[in-house]
Structure formats: C-alpha cells, structure tokens
Image (cartoon, grey):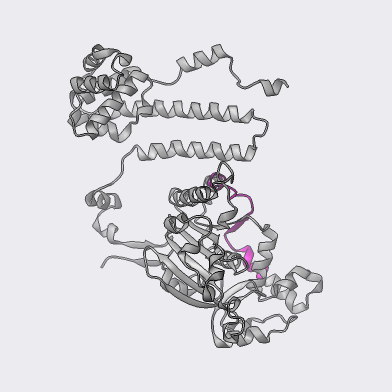
Amino acid sequence: MKKQQQQSLWTPDELSRLRESLPSDTFAESVVLGACLERPDTHLPVARSILSSDDFYLEAHRAIWSAIVALDESGRRPDRVTVASWLRDQGRLESVGGITKIAALDSSVPALVSIEGYCRILHDKGMLRRLIRHAAELQAMCFQAEADPMNLVAEMERRAMEVCQDVATSKGEADTFEEVVEAKGGLDKYFSRDLGRAARTPWPELNDILGPMMPGQLVCFAARPACGKTVVGLQLAAHTARSRETVFCSLEMQPQELYDRLVAARGGIRHETIQAGIASMSSEEKRAVMAAASDIATLKLRINPRAARTVSSLRGYLMRLRASRRPAEVVVVDYLQLMRGPMGGGNKRYDEVSDITRNLKLLAEEMNVVMVILSQLNREVERRPGGRPQLSDLRESGTIEQDSDKVVFLHRPELYKRDDPSLVGQMVMIVNKNRQGRIGDVILRFEPEFQRVVRYTPMGIACRQDTDATQTRSAKDSQNCDVQDLWEEEAPDTVLPS
C-alpha cells in the first residue's frame, strides 16, 4: 500500500526548491530580447535559428519572445512600441511587467557583434530543463501499477532522441540551392551519386524497375494472406545481410521458424523436411543443411520478434544497435498491421495505422536506414476479376501509399485462375508506386516448398512440378532451374561526374 501511495521521490517543499533551482540564465534572456528589439535586422535571424519559446525560463520573457516572433512573421518590424502594442491587444502587457519592463530590456544590452553565444546559453539551459521535465514524468509513470518496463524504456529513449533532434534542428538547415551545394561540398560532390549504401532486392528484373532502395526511404511490399509476404521479406533481408547490417522484425513468427525457412531456401531442401528434424534426413540432405547453415552464419542478419511492437520500441532497438557500433542499415518489418500505436487499437485503427506509417517514414530518415514494411491488402482484391491488386487495396489506411516511397504488390494469378496450368508457380511483383523511378510488372516463380522466390523460366516450372516429395535438389539441379543465388549481392553503384 505504501508503494501505491508514494507518487514522487520529492516532498512538496523539495519540489518547490527544485523549480527555483532549475537551470536558467535570466540575464542572458534579457540580453537576447533587448538585442532583438534594438537591432532586429541583425540579431533576430540568428536568435530565431537557434531559440524557441521554451528556451526562455521566465514566463514574461516567453511572452515577449512570442510577440517578437509574431510581429516578424507578419512582416512588421519588432521594437519596443510594436511589441508593447501587440501584447496589449492580446491582454498580456501587464502580466509581463508593462511597458517599463520592455523598455528596460534595451538597457541590458552590451555592445554585441553577435548574440549567437548568448542564444547557445539559453538553448542549453532549455535543454536541461526539458530533460528534467521528461525524467520527472517518466518517474511518475514508473509508479503506476500497470506500467510496462519495456515500454517505459522505449519512451525514455524516444524522449532523449527528441532532445537530440532539437539540438540538430537548432543549427539551421540549408534551403537555397547555393546552401545545399555548399553543404554537399561543392558542385562536383553535389552531382556525384554514390549509391554505396543503397540496398537492392535479390531479383535483378525487379531491380531494373524498382531502382535502388536508399537510406531514409519507406518501401512497402503488400499482398493478401498466404501469398508469400514473409518469404519475400525474409529473402530480401538475407540478400542485403550479405554486406549490410540487416534487421528482420517478425511479429508473428519466432527466430527459429524463420531461420528454418532460410535453411530450406539456401539449401534447396523442402521446408517440411527441415521441420521433421535431422534424424529423418538422408546423408545428402544433412550435408545440404550443414552447408546452408554455414552460409547463413556469415550473414549480418538479426531476427527480433519483439523490436517492432511499436514504433517507439523499434526506435529504441535501433538506437541500442547504433550504440553497439553495429547500426542497422536495412530494417524489414513483418508485418505492419500487427504493430500498435502508443495508445493501443481502440476504435480508431485507421488513424493508428496512419500514425504508425508516418512515424516509420520519419524513423527511416532519422536512423538513415532502408525501411521495408510488409502489409496486408483488404478483401476487395478478391472480388475483382483476376485479383490484381491496386493502391486502394492497402489495408486499413490510405496513408500507407502516401508515406511509402515505393509500393510493390505480390500477386499470384494461379489463386484466381486455378484452371490455367500455365499460371502455376507464377508470382507477379507489381511496382505500383515508385517516387524515383518507373512502374511495371515482373514475373517470378514462387516455390513454397523451398520458401523462396526465384527467376521465372519454363524450365524452372517443369523442374518444380517434377520434384519428388522426398528428393533434395542438388546444386546442379538448382542451376538448371535458374535459381537466383540469394547470397550474391550486386556491386554498389557509383556514378561520378565526368
């Protein structure tokens, strides 16, 4: 009972003293405000590029700063008279100390060439106050009986990252073409296109249409249930993990189940044989399993079943990987609709999924990773003749298509035209959205018994249909069936200026 009644580590008197001793520099606040009123053309642009209203400790100073910013944004020159008039119209002049307080600000200003140093002081003090506030709020959350420790850790990491982002954005951004070119290091470097960090899929025909998947992009692979989403996502992750740190976040399968699939795909061994265990395998199958396991052990691949429960938990996991000096470069989430927002599902699932996809896109940019999400399609696709997906079929949220840089649909025609033997084994990858490239279709071959997608050839179809249930495909047979090697990643593309 005592633990439930205790809500804070501090008594009311201690809290009062804490508020009085919060980091601040009211003299520097007066200097900055006075300088902006005296020479707004020189000092205000510098101050606005660094400060926000939260960086001012005194409420009166926050009100005066808000007035200065509002006047500047409206095109009016802020000075003592215009600021006093604006505050009077808002009914806040007396609360800041009247015209006397505003006039006194100018007398505090020393002879300044630049106020950047003073602004940095205020911003640093404001950062410390924000950290203290977040710590106090998280402390209160920890006393709640229903608190989930892992969610609190993720929330702590999220808030810390927000403070870090605040520091980054306070340094200003390049806006004009000249500034962007200068930030890149000159025209030569600006027009260089180093794609060394770009990721590609295991299927060259798809790469020709889709183009490179760049850090910061959100790429969506979508399909109806049982159409091969996990197979495609896992195969893509294994392919990129040959040379890039890759994370596969599964919300419905355990790591062992997924690694079993990789062994089947790599070794050309039926998945059901892997499931039956090594005791039931032939000598040839055992050798194939061991060879496949050795290859998989070389991959830079992590499979985590918990990291992507929420965007916050995924951010925390990626931050921990960054701290371990093995930061992720490619992240695959299987699948989007199993993720939850910070407040749970409720009756606003559309809004929740919209918020998740928007934050995944922001997370891709923040962490500089290729973010690949697998998504389900709604039932409308099954009512359409031929079952060909389109963007409106993306399940539960139209913002999936808006937030994604690339959208690829997985379509298996044989599920809709079962009387056509020529469609057996076909998987059509439909590039329906591509911000930096073209759209189009690629026909591949889906091999569910081996848990993989390979290049489509008539010879391959024959090979697939004639394979005996107990037969293990040898390396030679795999080559005859034109199986794309999942472990062979293309060399990085680099285009240099002539």
Q: How many marks?
A: 0
Percent coordinates x, y for residue 121 in the rendering = 35, 26
Q: Position of residue 94 (x, y in %)?
A: 30, 14
Q: Quadrant of the C terminus?
A: bottom left
Where does the magenta region start and end?
Answer: 292-316
Would you say residue 266 sits in the magenta stretch? no
Is there any visible trace of residue 338 in the rendered image? Answer: yes
- Residue in view at x 54 percent, y 60 percent: 375
Q: Where 173 falls versus 31 (above or below)?
A: below
Q: Is residue 313 magenta-colored?
A: yes
As displayed, is residue 7 above or below residue 305?
A: above
Q: Nearer the viewer, residue 11 or 482?
A: 11
Between 497 and 72, the residue placed more toward the observer is: 72
Residue farthest right in this picture = 279
Q: Position of residue 125 (x, y in %)?
A: 40, 25
- Which residue is drawn at the image coordinates 18% and 20% (left, top)? 81
Left or right: residue 215 compared with residue 348: left
Q: Is residue 255 left or right of residue 247?
A: right
- Up-down: is 19 above or below 146? above
